[in-house]
Image: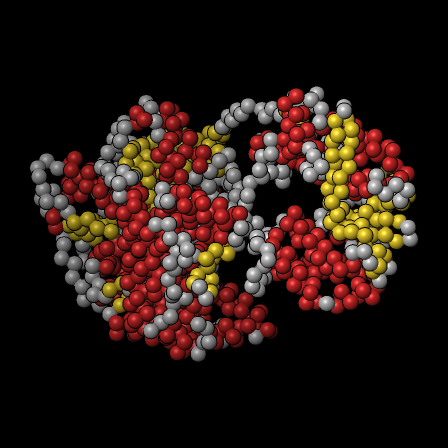
Amino acid sequence: MERFLAQCARYIYKKHSDELKDICLVFPNRRSGVFFTAYLQKELAVPSIGPKTTTVNELIASYSEWNAAEKLELISLLYDVFSKHTKTTETFDEFYFWGEILLADFNDIDRYLVDAKDLFRNVSDLKEIESIFDYLTDDQKKALEQFWGSMAVADKSGFRDKYINIWDKLYPVYVDFRQQLLKEKLAYAGMIDREVAEKVKSDRLEFPLSKYYIIGLNALNTCEIEIFDHLKKLGKAVFLWDYDVSYVEDLQNEAGHFLRNNLKIFAPPEDFELNTDIFNHRKDISLVAVSSVYGQSQQIPNFLKDTEKNYRKEFDNTAVILADESLLFPALGAFPEDIGTINITMGYPVRNSVVYGFLMLLVNLLKNKRKSETGFSAFYRYVTDILNHQLLGSSEKERTADFVTELKKNNKINVELKGIDFSSIHTRIFKLPENTAEYSDYFLDVLGLLYHQQKNSGDSMLLELLYSVYQAIEKLGVVVKKTLQAQQRQISDTVYFRLFTQYLGQVSVAFEGEPLSGMQVMGILETRCLDFENLIILGLNENKWPRKFTAPSFIPHNIRMGFGLPGIDEQDAMYGYYFYRLIQRAKNVTATYSVVKEGIGTGELSRYGYQLRYDSVHKPKMRNLDFVFANDPVEDITIPGSDEIQKQLVEKNSEDHPLSPSAINTYLNCPLKFYYKYVVELPEPEEVKEEIDGVVFGNIFHDTMEELYSVFVGKEVTRSDLEQLGKDKVRINNEITKQIAKHYLKQKEPIKGPVKLEGKTLLIFENIKTYLSQLLKKDMEYAPFNVVSLEMKYKRNIEIGGKKLWVGGKIDRLDEKDGVTRVLDYKTGNVSSLSFRLVDELFDRDAKNPKKEILQALVYCWGLAKENQGATIQPAIYGLRKLFESKFEWEVKMNRSKVAFDEIAEDFEEELTGLVGEIYSAENSFAQTEYLDKCKYCAYNGICRRY
């Protein structure tokens, strides 16, 4: 197989062996120029001065006197012009996005030499299309008629008139904007192209070299066509196209869209020998489905093994093409060690680097900073994400760990930044700038300190990333300051960070290496004009090749079609050509695609893969890359009882530390969790609670109720008492706020100073107030009653095996009415049922849906019964979520009858004694629950490997 560029080199050398220095070669990119030079050197018989090589963009730019301005500068000038003509009330921030779109449209208008006045003309009469736009083709006129026809339909709502009114202003904006740029000697890219094309048209430019070879181009804009046509008329242009008749002659194939026209207007020389019927030659093609995005790189070793007979250590033998550029590092890690030299022709995008990730954390901090009297503060997660980042991992580790621990301990949601001064880099990071004019210097200072810190790390890639990012932000800083000073423009955070991500998104770090040796790793655009015998394409998904992104436009699709401006169809045609041209000379082609559907990923093979399967002579093999994962099965965990465990539990049990109802429920729910929590006493991990969880919410509510009802203890409470309490809004609000400060904000009592509630804490405040108000209403309905006690501690012993074991806890409220003592328990969580059938049902071990609320209330009743012989004790549960039901029920029922504890006391004590004896037995064992749903929010599920 002879490569296209090798054929070009042989042809050009044959024609110009004695005058190479007098010709210019125009390529689509620099990489193709490097490969061409290598092929040309093989043709040389004696040392020679080589031809001038350039890209089409560089060629055009070399004939312009204007300077290409930065986007911020252009949009700032455009905003002034747009405001003058449209009288818009939009701010610069609001306009910036539209300014980008408008600038892109102006760029297209100029590159395609469209008459802007015609394009933005107010078309009020459809017949004018025939008379005014007589230079348009029939297809273009049809496209315009379709658009204005659809606009006429919208005329009923007045939309058409409003739309056309805006369009009326765009031509004056376009003209005025260009005039303003000319005064400043600035231009955008399309404006430069148009200037050169118009100079060529009027014969005001000289092309001094004898020949200009246009090699391997595809999609040409109108300016390029004008320039090349001029060179052709001068007899100085030679066009060497790379194509195959299989897709050029197939009018349905988008890959030949541009070549069909190029071959007509710029025919190649008749003596240029190019085999244009090689696509249909036999090829070994495989399409490999992979159930992982990054796992696609694992096909590389398989491919190299399959093609080892055809593999040679030459620069144009084998290439890995990354349709998805994020696969670069996985691909590099997949190459066997003995593969030899690998040349990466694409740069490593900064946006995929650890440095970019760190800068985005700083951006989040700046976006979400809050100004207070003492300085800036921020949400804790924005701070801890920075402190825990790997780039700061080696800086003051102990102080950082202590600081983060303190945040968790005190549940600090908002963090004051001024105290984070562990090192010079910490001080600079958390000393935030006041406005956008200082942002670039802030980032540069941080990057400088990071570079100094990492200088001796030996990580040359990281240092190169830091340096490249530094240069990009330095450039952005110059542009921002120039715009601020010259145009007195205020730039908001939104605009600055949009520019920030755009500047960094264009930065890539080049890998050092010899471009003409070994295996090539490259992106799609680097493949233009290049040919390889063996190809592996990674990421041949529909959203990766062709690329799906198209820039938004003020110019509707049909209007763009009518005036010959590019759209999604042209973009698809470009990527179609890149694909077909790349594989037309290859012998072995393997393409992988991910079947994972996530984000914008479709999990679908590219259309080009389907075209190979169903619309070509090739019959690709369809394969799957399977990954075998063999993990050892997770074994059930059971801790056998022992004399030591029994002794440990018994020693912990005392009058002051009785076995609590919640511990009993924990054991019934999952004995292993009981073991972790009460035997070995593993602490639950402490985290900052962004939201008030169920436990904290319950503590706030219980303590608030205790404080508000404390004045009623030992007294009869009447309806009027409760009404009076409900009206005392100040007392209620203060008490709720105090308990939020104590339990959630972790402030020490007595609470000093005012407590500011905001965001989620304010929502919790309102929720508790609503529940409390409803509870007062239910108590009013039950009044009058006597409050016996609040949060009363009780304890009662059980004798088992000659040992006294204590069971006890706190009863939320005891009240008495008509000779009945209610043991009342507040439940802030969900209470599924207040009824049961048999006492032993409450003591079921590891039940799927345990009745833990009922059991807890009855344990309270049992604890109270010994000291109140003969009293009628009734368990009561106030489920706060049920307070709003029309038929609110609080009575615990057995077989549909309300429970009086003395009626079940004997059975209950027997079951409880048996359970306590089991817990404290040396023969007992602590096993996992069989119900995985219980493990979902368990603090110990990581130990059990359940979640």
Q: Position of residue 453 (x, y in %)?
A: 29, 45
- Please identify the quarter of the rendering in which residue 486 is found: bottom left
Residue 800 horizontal/vertical position (percent): 77, 26
Place of residue 47 in the rendered image (x, y in percent of width and height, measured from the top left):
8, 39
Q: Is 443 above or below relative to 903?
A: below
* Image-quadrant location for residue 915: top right
Quadrant of the frame with the C terminus = top right
Q: What is the quadrant of residue 929 in the picture?
A: top right
Q: Nearer the viewer, residue 92 or 866?
A: 866
Residue 638 visible, this angle: no
Q: Is residue 173 left or right of residue 946?
A: left
Up-down relation of residue 689 to residue 634 (above or below): below
Q: Position of residue 200 (x, y in %)?
A: 22, 64
Q: Is residue 934 visible?
A: yes
Of residues 843 and 739, the one nearer the viewer is 739
Residue in the picture at 41% in, 33% down: 297
Horizontal relation, residue 500 to residue 230: left or right: right
Q: Does residue 657 appear left or right of residue 275 in this picture? A: right
Q: How is the image coloured?
A: secondary structure
- Image quarter hosting the N terminus: top left
Residue under the point 57% across and 75% down: 158
Q: Residue at x 60, y 24 (%)?
A: 635
Number of numbered discs visible in the structure rendering: 0
Quick one: 17 or 914, which is closer to the camera? 914
Instruction: Write the residue at 83% across / 33% down.
Output: 909
